Image (cartoon, rainbow, N blue to C red):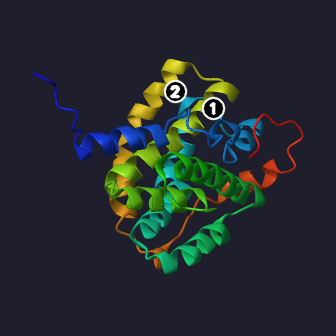
Amino acid sequence: MALSTVTPMTTDAVLTLTQWMSPGFPVGAFAYSHGLETAIAHGEIDDRDSLEEWLRDIIAFGSGQADVVILSAAYHATENDVADIDATARAFSASAGRLMETDQQGGAFARTVDEVWGTGLGALTYPVAVGRAASAKGFALDLTAHLYLQAFTANLISAAVRLVPLGQTEGQSLLASLAALIRETVEQATQTPLSRLSANCFAADIASMQHETLYSKVFRT
């Protein structure tokens, strides 16, 4: 008897979203530190504990939760509203580096998804592109947002593993310890309207601005 080739939608969504958020997906995430390189260069982050404190603030009060608010707005938006949401995402970038980061990653993500999955995203910032792509494919918002924020966090930990440095196992242990905060942040941020978009991580914003003039750099931001 031939085996069924029908794949449940839930499995398809998990596999596709995992592919989109994979470090191997060609958005160039490995080249960006989100200002983390500056904080490490200035001695503000030099071990796991200081990194965890920095990441917890970014996830819950900074650009981590803000990206999820933007992603959620893009997911629910009509086609006519996408441009305004994308403009908001660009205006909300705290530095030229942050704008470059979301613009270039979003553009690379959209080009690949448009080519492989037949969507028509066009040039969008990263959270807007992910939200629109997930909506177009009928993937659940909460699953999309969880994987997006987890990938965002994992990329920053990967940068710190190279720069602090931290051990690979220590990095994975830290990512696992942040899972509950990622879940709580997604639950709150997906219920937050774009009109209440905010971030309160001024040290991270300043670090991102200072990265532009950092003498020696490994990362683009």
Front residue (pair 184, 87): 87
For label 1, the crowd category at 10 Å Cα-Cα, with few meaning under 14, some 14 to 19 and many 20 or more, is: many
Residue at 61 percent across and 51 percent down: it is 111
Q: Which mark is residue 6?
A: none
Q: Quadrant of the N terminus?
A: top left
Residue type marked 2: Gly
Give the farthest residue toward the front: 1
Q: Is 183 on the left or on the right of 33, as rendered? A: left
Callout 1 amino acid:
Ala
Image location (x, y in percent) of residue 151: 49, 41
Residue depicted at x 46% and y 65%: 69
Spatial separation of the CA atoms under disc 2 and disc 1: 8 Å
Let me know if residue 182 appears in the view: yes
Res 28 quadrant in image: top right
Task: Find numbered disc 2 in the image and state the secondary structure of the residue it sits on.
Answer: helix
Residue 160 image label: 1
Label pair 2/1, CB-CB below 8 angstroms: yes
In percent of width and height, residue 157 lies at 56, 34
Q: Which mark is residue 171?
A: 2
Query: Does 170 sit left or right of 95 as displayed?
Result: left
Could you say which quadrant of the image residue 32 lies in? Answer: top right
Position in image of residue 108 (x %, y %) = 64, 49
- Residue drawn at x 54%, y 20% is 168
Disc 1 secondary structure class: helix
Q: Mark 2, residues whose alpha carbon is within 10 Å: few (<14), some, or many (≥20)? A: many
Q: What residue lies at 25% left-to-right and 45% top-to-bottom? A: 10
Q: Is residue 68 visible?
A: no
